[in-house]
Amino acid sequence: MRIISLLPAATEWVCAFGGREALVGRSHVCDYPPEVVDLPVLTRPRVDAQGTSAEIDRQVRAVWEEGKSLYEIDWAQLHALQPDLILTQAQCPVCAVSASELEAGLADWPGSPPRLFTMAPQTLKQVLDSALALGRAIGRTQEAMSYLARAEKRLRQLRDFLGLRRRMEGVPLPRVVCIEWLDPLIVAGHWMPDVVELAGGQPVLTESGHPSRTISWAELQEVDPDVLLLMPCGFSVAQTARELAALSQRPEWQALRAVQEGRVFVLDGHAYFNRPGPRLYRSIELVAVCLHPDRLSPELLDVQPWELQTLEAALA
């Protein structure tokens, strides 16, 4: 089987299930695991992803106003690679090439077109269901089941260690807001409330399975969370850190309890939180470190600075 993956999460799942050798092409964003970076790149963005949140937002809106997709597909190279299966998504037109765009292009495919496998999970359970379905689609059902079983075992061990599997009567869980974009402010939805709950927190301003949404500073001030997690979509810790100085000057920011108490954390949204892939299990561990520092130290889980930093460390 010859597979082209235009979705980073799908690329990671294929490799996690032992299917790397079947991959013959990727999107420009598919950068993990490292052994996929030499594959032919079949897409390119129409925006500069290295700008600030506000700059990227303006570019995205400008492209949409022109009626264009955010991504260009190298159809000539895609045809030349003769794939049997193409992996994509039908969830967010900003994050990756959409299924509808591929379907339109495949309509003109000479001969029998490749199959299209689309992922569009809204909850963590749907992420895992989609992963299992992908395993079946690439002929690796047993490998998929084994991988997910090992990951679930590791998650159970983490929750047992933190005492989260026992009923904690009268013990309030920290109230958490996950910020997926900085300007405008967007709170992370979809599977992120599930990630927070499994890490021992109480997500606010969003619910499992609901899309990410724009919020006002007034809304954030009103809920005044115990913990604030910054994980902008597509941003590394370093890229997010470059915007923190301007963010910290806002009076609304300075008034937040999480800021005053030192419970703001910067995480690698690009690698862990924005992708519905196998590293969501690591995402749960990283959130748990933020929420339960009295029971879980970064050293215990070998947390690296590029994965997670406190606000103070990111500003330094």
Image (cartoon, rainbow, N blue to C red):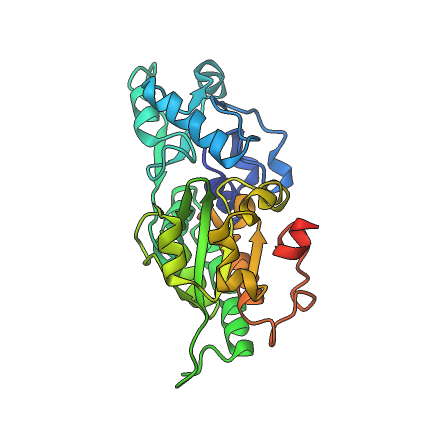
Residue found 45% across the figure and 47% down from its top: 180
| Image height of 186 relative to 83, above or below | below
Residue found 36% across the figure and 32% down from its top: 93
Give whichever of 14, 309 is nearer the camera.
309
On the picture, is 99 further left or further right than 44? left
| Image height of 55 relative to 173, above or below | above
**Can I make out residue 5 in this image?**
no
Give whichever of 133, 55 is nearer the camera.
55
Outermost residue on the front side: it is: 251
Image coordinates for residue 200, horizontal then vertical, percent = 46, 70
Image coordinates for residue 268, horizontal then vertical, percent = 57, 48
**Can I make out residue 28 in this image?**
yes
| Image height of 167 relative to 159, above or below | below
Residue found 34% across the figure and 40% down from its top: 91
Residue 15 lies in quadrant? top right
Image coordinates for residue 94, horizontal then vertical, percent = 40, 33
Total number of numbered labels?
0
Image coordinates for residue 92, horizontal then vertical, percent = 36, 37
